[in-house]
Structure formats: structure tokens, C-alpha cells
Amino acid sequence: MHYLDNAATTPVIDSVADIADKTLREHFANPSSLYALGADSEAVITQSRRELAKALSCAEKEIVFTSCGTEGNNLAIIGACNARKNWANHIVVSAYEHPSVRNVCEYLKSSGYSVTEIKPSIEGNVDVLEIINAVTPKTALVAAMHINNETGAIIDVEELARGVKKANSRTAVHVDGVQAFGKIEIKLSNSNIDSYAVSGHKINAPKGVGALYLKGGFNIKNVMHGGSQERGLRPGTENTAYIAALGLAAQIASKNTLNPVVLKQLLVDGIINIGNIEINSPQNAHPSIVNFSVLGVKSEVLLHFLEEKSIYVSSGSACSKGAKSHTLTAMGLDAKRIDSSLRVSFGRQNTQQDVVALIDAIKIGQKTLAR
Ligand code: PLP
């Protein structure tokens, strides 16, 4: 099997599955219980929080465990906007955000917010200065994704946050770091970023667990209401086993940042050699994600042809379930190029053999499937 869809999700590595299993069996007690068994469960969470804080270079108290990246984005964005409601009515985002940011902004429009979307260039990059220049005295929040999930385009979020704070010191800066965690090192305590969302299943931990960095002193209002877990910001009994898994996966990922430049080069050289293929990712994209169009062959047709050969890629983002790519549309690419686009995303387990198998299969697919 050649699994090349790691931006959709990653396989759970054995040691991470083992720690989840062990925690499920040995630390079933409620972490809030006052007896020693509960304290032992709480200690598992504390240890994991320490790992997340190390991986993101921030204080332990700045980490809130969540159920996923989507929840982190919702909590940070709605929480920041609700805390700024009495003076602000405006949000600025890139035009290629994930639905877990884009649809939250759409929802906030019903509470009176207007949303400015900054489009990427046709090459796929968003200009940080354009985002900063859109900030007004009434801007509650700027949100931008660190690595785009469809093309791998990178936004320099530290430069962005510096500029936003200069333009309006009260504006919150939220970063969707789901695709960047474990791929780009970040020192959050030294930055002007107020919140940064990550997700377990993109770094070889299970689905259904994530974390949100919230800068100390950052002004945010509760979105959910319940118990006092996670400082009341994410109430509900903690998923101790998955939190333990996330902690270990974060430790492993940050010791070995994913940077598959050799695999990317091999892929790009191979597909350019085949001909009639356009690369959609910007040149300076992160090497873990390569988006390209096999002109004349519909994405889904080629995807299933590859699947028959046990090669797994995506026709866009997994969340859009075959819908037209939002990012490629925002870039202004033509419909034919969008309809024939594929996304290959590398993970820690991939080898050159995976890439060679893919190139060989695309060669055959292009010949046999072209309309
Ligand atoms: N943000 C980005 C950039 C993503 O790629 C994803 C998932 O694909 C998410 C957010 C949502 O993360 P989760 O699936 O953990 O809710």
C-alpha cells in the first residue's frame, strides 16, 4: 500500500497507540476525582500538557486540550470575537481558510460581523501585507492558516501577527496550525500570535483529540459552559487516553520535524517528465503537500484508478468530499485545471518507492483515462 494522503489523516504509530491503550486500561479514573487514582489520571494530562508546551514553545498553562482542530478554531475565533463585541465588528481572513475557520466567520456574520477575505495570488500565496492593511480600528480578529491543507502554501504567521498588532493592538490573531504542527517549528511565547490550533490525527495520534494554545492574558470568552476542566474553556471530562497519545505524538513529531524535500523533488521531476501536468502548489510551498493537475483526466477518475493500485491520494481536502477545491478556486485557476487536480501529501512513513509507484501509475492513467 502507498498511502500518500497524510494531510487528510495520518496512521497512528505503534508507540502512540500503545500509550492510549495503556492509559485506557490503567488510568480510567476521572482526573477531577480527589482520591489518588484521580490524581494519577490528572498526572497523565499534566505530562501531556508539558509535551505540547515544549513542542509549541509556550507555557503549560497556555495549552487547552480540545477534541479536534475544528473545535480549537471555533473556540478561539468565537471566543475572541465575543470578548471584543462592544467595540469591534470586523474580521480579516485569508480567502483559502479551512471550513472550520471559513464557516465560523460565516456564522459570525449573523452576529453583525463583516468579513474581509484576502485572496491568494494565482501562484497560491497570500500577501501578509495585504492582510495587515485590511485591519481597521474595529477589527476584532485576524485568522490565517500556517500551512494550507490543499497546496502547502505557507503564511509567515509571526510576521503577520507583528504587523497586525502594530495596526491595532486589540485585534486578536488566530492561527490554524493544524497542517503545520510537526512540520514548521514555532516559538509561540516569543510571538504576537494569540491562539494556535493543532490536531492529533495529522501527527500520527488518533482522531478526536487536539490542543489550542491561548496566550497568557489573552482576552477570550467561554463558548461552551460546564465544569471547570481546561480552565472552564473546554468543559467536559477529559479524554485522558487520547490526550496521552497526543502528548507522545507531539514529542515524537517535534524531535523529527517533517521536511520531505527529497520526496517532493522526486515527485515534481517525475510528473513534469510525464508532461501535460501543471503544478498548482506555489514554488515555496511546504514540501509535504504537492497539488497538481493531470490535464484531461478528471480528479476522481484518476483517484479511483490509483486506488485500484493501492495508491491513496486526494482530489482536494478530505473535508470537502469531492466538492470543487476552495483554495484552487480562490487562486483563480480555470475549471479544467481544478477538475483535474490531485493532492499528494507525505507523512513520516513514506519512501521513494511510494513516489515511484505513483509516478508510474499516473503515466499509465494519463494514457488510458484522458478524454
Ligand atoms: N484546519 C486544517 C488546515 C485542516 O487541514 C483540518 C483537517 O483537515 C482542520 C483544520 C480540522 O481538523 P480536525 O479534523 O481535527 O477537526
Image: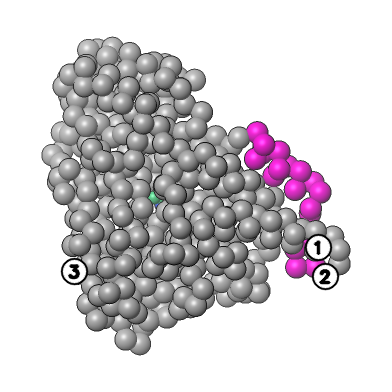
Residue 322, visible in the rendered structure: no
Q: In the image, which residues are magenta?
A: 14-33
Residue beneath label 3, please? Answer: 133
Q: Is 209 displayed left or right of 324 in the figure?
A: right
Q: Which mark is residue 38?
A: 1
| Tag 3–tag 1 contact (CB < 8 Å) | no
- Whole-percent x, y for residue 227 in the image: 66, 74
Identity, as a three-letter code, of the amino acid under mark 3: Asn
Q: Which mark is residue 34?
A: 2
The image shows residue 93, relative to residue 14, as above or below, that is below
Q: Which mark is residue 103?
A: none
- Whole-percent x, y for residue 172 in the image: 37, 72
For the residues labelled 1 and 2, the Cα–Cα distance comes to 6 Å
Residue under the point 76% across and 43% down? 22
- Whole-percent x, y for residue 35 in the image: 86, 67
**Label 2 crowd (10 A; few <14 / some 14-19 / many >=20):** few
Identity, as a three-letter code, of the amino acid under mark 1: Gly
The image shows residue 209, relative to residue 300, as above or below, that is below
Q: Looking at the picture, tell me which residue is in the foreground, 165 or 211.
A: 165
Q: Residue 235, located in which quarter of the rendered image?
A: bottom right
| Tag 1–tag 2 contact (CB < 8 Å) | yes
Residue under the point 16% across and 49% down? 121
